[in-house]
Each structure stands twice: as C-alpha cells, then as structure tokens.
Image: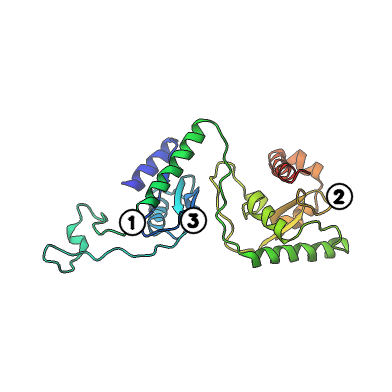
C-alpha cells in the first residue's frame, strides 16, 4: 500500500513525504531527512526502495525521514493462541502484510512526526532549510582528501604554499558545501542527498586557478572532471554551462558568508 501510494504521487507530480521504520531505535540524534535513495540502515526503507525501483522504475525524488541508527532488535517471535510459535504468513490478511511487531520506544516515532511536520510547514512558508547531509565519511577520509589536495597542488603548481585550508575546513567544504558529491552531481530538488560511499574517485581542486586553494575557491570533483575543469577557463564554463557556473559560484559565495570573507 505504501509503495503504491508513493508511486502514484510521483507519477501525478504530487508532493509527498514519507517515513521509514522508527522501531527498535533509541537515538533521536541519528534521525535524518533525505532522498529515499540515501536512506540507510533501515530494512523497511530498503524494501520500499526495491519495490519502487522494480515495480515502478522509481529510484529517487521522494523525501523520507529515517534513522541512521541500526535497529537494536528484530521482529518479535509470532505466537499463536496456544502460546507456541507459528508461521506469521498464515495470519496475513494480504500477502506481505506484517503481523509480527517490533519493539518501539515511543518518543522516536513522535520525533519522526515532528521532523515531518517541520518540513511541511517550512515548505509551505517558502523557507529554504539546509538539511544535514547523510555522512558516510570518517575523519580519515577527510585527511586523505586534504593530502590529495596538497599533492595535486605540488604536482600542478610546484608548491602547496597556496593551500589555505586545514582538515577541519576540508570537512566543511566536503560535507556542508558539496554534500560529499561531485559538484557536477548536485541536484537542488534533492533533500539532503547523502555523501559518496567512497572517496576513491573524488578530489578537491581550485574553482578559479588564479586564486589560492581557499575555503571559498575549492570544488569537489571526480578525477576525470577535475582534469577537464583545469583545462578550461571560467569564461568558457560561464558561456557554455551558465547554470553550472551559477550554481557553483552560489555555493562558494555561501562559504564567504559563513566565514565572513
């Protein structure tokens, strides 16, 4: 029922917001709002994603509230009237209908509801809220990206003296500005889409090669994209890709505002 309803809304162009499993969770700080394809650690969400993709060809575009916390318990055993365990499928009203239950800490579903209500109200009010990206990098990943930047600067310019960011600032650039994805893989319609699962193909490079590698002049790109970017001028990008140029400059302007530059 939930899958069919979500699919119907998407196909009709209706705005829809969904929630995944809140059962067996206890940490409210792990609750996130993101596109459904980035919801993780949730068996219900995984099943919904699979059905949407398989039955309706829908892979993304639906904002969902979910928890990054792994469930702390499994479905409780199903016992019949005689107190003995029985096959739950024998009691299903319709195929796939779950008759077993999972332990729920009452506050967590309530917080899910509050997050959903806040999202709807801010959308109706026209208030743009920057959601917290779904973080899959740890501090070692940021160190790698920082070191990769230094080595690239030394290779390209013969020195890393113009690298004006440390690891803490790389965290901000990668997580808050680019959400862990290539600058060419951004979508303004997404709701806090998640970060790349790996950094093997990502690097930070200067947006404007005439300026230092500062917090307001670094973009996250795939290796091939970085090579192409450094072979072009900003004037060329602005003329041939005005939308991309405008989006990147807008993001970098946010860094200037955040750091008072």
* Contact check, label 2 and label 1, Cβ < 8 Å: no
Query: Is residue 243 placed above or below 232 in the rendered structure?
Result: above
Q: What residue lies at 40% left-to-right and 44% top-to-bottom?
A: 113
Residue 200 seen anywhere in this rendered image of the structure: no
Furthest-top residue in view?
125
Q: Is residue 256 left or right of residue 136?
A: right
The residue closer to the viewer here, 201 or 257, is 257
Q: What residue lies at 46% left-to-right and 60% top-to-bottom?
A: 69
Residue 123 percent location from the top left of the image: 51, 35
* Labels 2 and 3: the sequence-earlier one: 3
Residue 84 percent location from the top left of the image: 15, 69
| Mark 1 Cα-neighbour bin, 10 Å: few <14, some 14–19, many ≥20 | some
Q: Secondary structure at mark 2?
A: loop
Q: Is residue 55 left or right of residue 203?
A: left
Mark 2 to mark 3 CA distance (whole Å)? 41 Å
Residue 244 percent location from the top left of the image: 69, 42
Query: Is residue 152 placed above or below 233 in the rendered structure?
Result: below
The residue closer to the viewer here, 29 or 181, is 29
Q: Secondary structure at mark 3?
A: helix
Residue 65 percent location from the top left of the image: 45, 48
Tell me how the rendering is colored. rainbow
* Contact check, label 1 and label 3, Cβ < 8 Å: no
* Labels 1 and 3: the sequence-earlier one: 3
Mark 1 to mark 3 CA distance (whole Å)? 16 Å
Say which of marks 2 and 3 sits in front.
3
Residue underneath mark 3: 30
* Residue 104 - label: 1
| Mark 2 Cα-neighbour bin, 10 Å: few <14, some 14–19, many ≥20 | few
Residue underneath mark 2: 210
């Amino acid at each position: 029922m939930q899958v069919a309803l979500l699919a119907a809304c998407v196909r009709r162009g209706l705005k829809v917001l969904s929630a995944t499993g809140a059962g067996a969770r206890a940490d409210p700080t792990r609750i996130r709002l993101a596109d459904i394809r980035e919801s993780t650690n949730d068996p219900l969400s995984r099943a919904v994603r699979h059905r949407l993709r398989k039955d309706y060809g829908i892979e993304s575009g639906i904002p969902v509230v979910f928890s990054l916390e792994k469930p702390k318990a499994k479905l409780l055993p199903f016992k019949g009237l005689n107190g003995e365990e029985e096959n739950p499928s024998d009691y299903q009203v319709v195929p796939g209908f779950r008759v077993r239950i999972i332990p729920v800490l009452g506050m967590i579903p309530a917080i899910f509801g509050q997050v959903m209500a806040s999202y709807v109200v801010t959308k109706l009010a026209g208030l743009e809220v920057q959601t917290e990206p779904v973080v899959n990098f740890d501090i070692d990943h940021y160190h790698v990206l920082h070191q990769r930047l230094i080595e690239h600067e030394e290779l390209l310019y013969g020195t890393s003296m113009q690298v004006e960011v440390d690891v803490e600032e790389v965290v901000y650039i990668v997580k808050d500005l680019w959400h862990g994805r290539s600058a060419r893989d951004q979508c303004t319609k997404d709701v806090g889409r998640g970060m790349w699962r790996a950094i093997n193909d990502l690097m930070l490079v200067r947006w404007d090669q005439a300026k230092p590698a500062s917090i307001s002049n670094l973009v996250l790109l795939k290796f091939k994209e970085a090579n192409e970017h450094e072979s072009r001028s900003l004037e060329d990008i602005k003329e041939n890709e005005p939308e991309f140029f405008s989006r990147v400059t807008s993001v970098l302007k946010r860094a200037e505002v955040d750091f008072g530059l």
